[in-house]
């Protein structure tokens, strides 16, 4: 905690009712050349927890001692902190606020305010960034994943060969063809860092967003976007994708050949019992739309190795057991690849 008795005369009244000082930085933020005092104030709702809520920005004008409170839309989380520096190219400090969400996805909340002439103005809002930067993540044949960045009109191709046999053989056949379509996704903003790339006293932003594959913990890399202030907003000027490496000893291993029924390890497989709602054939590929007892829908793809008991008799409304490898896409409805379709006698 930091108080300056000369300029922060009401610091003594800042007791638990009025919140805690979570961070404090000094610098001229209103542009009058006199150092101002910038605080993040918040509550500690739980004893022994670093969680903070009701976080707001408080600016004390160094010259007039006048105080301004700026509420924040996302105002709860962990490790709230301040950074002062010029982003908007007017050589007057702006205020970067960072708050970690604490969620498993590693998301964080970021705002940048300017306070020129004592007028708060928002320069960066993480929610607008998340809405503007839209991605598509598609698994492709031959152990590739494409990441499409709509906002920058760019496509990145990731090689996931390093993921190893176990991972790859679950989703690819022995020819490197995907057994079923799989989509990943790009997480919301996880990190936002001020960097003065040109060393001219104005900071740019470096943003990173995690690329997730089959599930959130299945990291495929990071989308890294550098942004600079241009007239009235931050615009991307450089974007790359950072990928993970594999061991140099583990060179180019290919997935195991397709499992056959004798080799199914029982506990690896799952079964869904449901009713056939649709039988689809598209481009020679068959799939079943299944509704289970809880009215959840699934699409199961039938591939050449799928064992179908009584397929001729499969019809809409029939009850079936679908045995699959436990992997479903996150699409709606989820999709999987059937290993066994067993038509039940009604
Ligand atoms: Ca000032
Ligand atoms: Ca500025």
Image: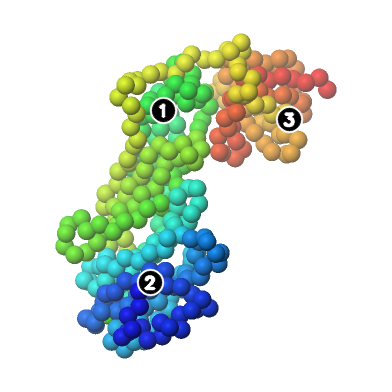
> Nearest the camera: 54 or 261?
54
Residue 192 coordinates in the image, percent (x, y): 35, 56
Would you say the beta carbon of the disc 2 residue lies within 8 angstroms of ligand 1?
no
Is 58 left or right of 302, judged from the image as shown?
Answer: left
Residue 189 visible here: yes
Q: Which of marks 2 and 3 is nearer the N terminus?
A: 2
Kindly report the distance in space between the C-alpha atoms of the residues bearing marks 2 and 1: 46 Å
> Are the residues tagged 2 and 3 within 8 Å (C-beta)?
no
Residue ID at (26%, 77%): 28
Q: Identify the residue under disc 1.
A: 163
Mark 1 secondary-structure assignment: helix
Residue that mark 2 sits on: 1
Q: In this view, does 328 lie above or below 164?
A: below
Question: Which residue corresponds to the image point at 19% horizontal and 65% vertical from the top-left?
Answer: 201
Q: Is residue 231 visible?
A: no
Residue furthest to the right: 346
Q: Is mark 2 on a helix, strand or loop?
A: loop
Q: How far apart are marks 2 and 3 (CA)?
A: 60 Å
């Amino acid at each position: 905690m930091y108080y300056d008795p000369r300029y922060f005369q009401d610091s003594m009244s800042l007791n638990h009712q009025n919140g805690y000082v979570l961070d404090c930085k000094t610098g001229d933020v209103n542009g009058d050349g006199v150092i101002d005092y910038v605080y993040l104030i918040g509550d500690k709702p739980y004893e022994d927890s670093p969680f903070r809520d009701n976080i707001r920005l408080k600016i004390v004008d160094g010259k007039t001692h006048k105080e301004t409170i700026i509420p924040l839309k996302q105002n709860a989380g962990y490790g709230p902190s301040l950074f002062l520096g010029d982003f908007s190219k007017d050589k007057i400090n702006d205020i970067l606020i960072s708050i970690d969400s604490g969620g498993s996805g590693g998301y964080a909340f970021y705002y940048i305010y300017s306070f020129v002439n004592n007028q708060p103005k928002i320069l960066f809002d993480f929610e607008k960034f998340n809405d503007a930067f839209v991605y598509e993540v598609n698994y492709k044949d031959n152990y590739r994943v494409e990441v499409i960045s709509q906002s920058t009109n760019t496509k990145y191709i990731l090689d996931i060969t390093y993921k190893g046999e176990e991972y790859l053989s679950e989703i690819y056949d022995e020819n490197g063809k995907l057994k079923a379509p799989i989509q990943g996704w790009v997480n919301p903003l996880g990190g936002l860092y001020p960097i003065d790339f040109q060393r001219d006293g104005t900071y740019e932003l470096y943003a990173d967003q995690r690329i997730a594959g089959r599930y959130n913990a299945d990291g495929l890399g990071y989308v890294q976007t550098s942004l600079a202030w241009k007239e009235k907003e931050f615009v991307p000027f450089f974007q790359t994708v950072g990928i993970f490496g594999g061991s140099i000893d583990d060179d180019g291993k290919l997935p195991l050949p397709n499992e056959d029924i004798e080799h199914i390890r029982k506990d690896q497989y799952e079964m869904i019992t449901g009713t056939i709602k649709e039988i689809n054939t598209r481009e020679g590929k068959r799939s079943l739309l299944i509704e289970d007892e809880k009215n959840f829908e699934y699409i199961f793809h039938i591939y050449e190795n799928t064992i179908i008991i009584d397929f001729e008799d499969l019809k809409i409304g029939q009850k079936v057991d679908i045995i699959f490898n436990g992997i479903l896409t996150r699409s709606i409805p989820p999709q999987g690849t059937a290993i066994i379709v067993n038509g039940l006698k009604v």
